[in-house]
Image (tube, grey):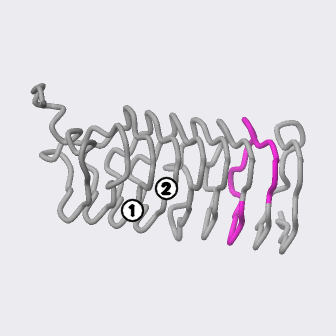
């Protein structure tokens, strides 16, 4: 079955929760204020696309491809990025709500999370080398055997990272949030 190739299109206020986005490859497209909540985006390729003000909560991402894709002011709750096509996966999140999502074993080198809520997100065994968490809330995010080498968490909040169970060499932290590296010890810091 031949899939569509859509290039340089603007999609505004579309409700893909009712009528699915046609399968295909979307190149340099912009999606503004579209509803993808609960929709099936499996097998769709997004290259150099921007999602602005969209709701992608609980969308299915089996073998979806996101290359050089930017999410701005999007609601992205409960997505399983580990189900995506990992080849060339490059994303950026700005002013998004990414809570309850999963990046289990996902390679996210050099990814930027800017002013994004990342509460209860699973980063277990993810590769987050050189990733930037700028003004992000990481409350109850899971880091287990995660590579955070040279990651920038200097302005991140509410993280809890076990330095004995994660790779943090060269990572940037700042006071007072750096106490999140000591949570497992149940000590009182004054």
Q: In the rendering, at what x and y percent does residue 115 appear?
A: 52, 50
Q: In the rendering, at what x and y percent does residue 48 appear?
A: 68, 72
Residue extent of the magenta highlight: 31-50
Where, by quadrant of the figure, is residue 80 drawn?
A: top right
Residue count near mark 2 (Cα–Cα under 10 Å), binned few <14, some 14–19, many ≥20: many
Q: Is residue 47 magenta?
A: yes
Q: Main secondary structure of the magenta part?
A: loop
Residue denoted by label 1: 131
Where, by quadrant of the figure, is residue 69 drawn?
A: bottom right
Q: Residue at x 53, y 47 (%)?
A: 116
* Left or right: residue 188 compared with residue 4: left
Which of the marked residues, 1 or 2, is nearer the chain's N terminus? 2
Disc 1, SS:
loop
Disc 2, SS:
strand
Residue denoted by label 2: 113
Q: Residue at x 41, y 55 (%)?
A: 133
Front residue of 80 and 147:
147
Q: CA distance from mark 1 to mark 2?
A: 8 Å
Q: Residue at x 79, y 63 (%)?
A: 30
Q: Is residue 30 magenta?
A: no
Q: In which quadrant of the rendered image does the N terminus lie?
A: bottom right
* Left or right: residue 130 compared with residue 187: right
Q: Residue at x 53, y 65 (%)?
A: 89
């Amino acid at each position: 079955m031949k899939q569509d190739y859509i290039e340089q299109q603007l999609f505004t206020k579309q409700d893909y929760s009712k009528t699915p986005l046609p399968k295909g490859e979307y190149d340099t497209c912009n999606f503004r204020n579209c509803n993808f909540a609960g929709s099936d985006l499996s097998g769709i390729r997004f290259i150099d696309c921007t999602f602005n003000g969209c709701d992608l909560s609980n969308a299915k991402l089996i073998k979806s491809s996101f290359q050089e894709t930017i999410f701005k002011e999007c609601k992205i709750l409960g997505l399983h990025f580990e189900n995506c096509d990992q080849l060339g996966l490059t994303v950026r999140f700005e002013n998004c709500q990414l809570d309850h999502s999963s990046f289990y074993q996902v390679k996210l080198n050099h990814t930027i999370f800017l002013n994004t809520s990342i509460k209860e997100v699973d980063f277990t065994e993810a590769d987050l080398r050189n990733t930037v968490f700028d003004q992000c809330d990481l409350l109850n995010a899971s880091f287990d055997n995660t590579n955070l080498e040279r990651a920038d968490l200097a302005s991140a909040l509410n993280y809890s990272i076990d330095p004995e169970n994660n790779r943090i060499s060269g990572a940037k932290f700042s006071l007072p949030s750096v106490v999140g590296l000591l949570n497992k010890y149940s000590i009182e810091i004054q």
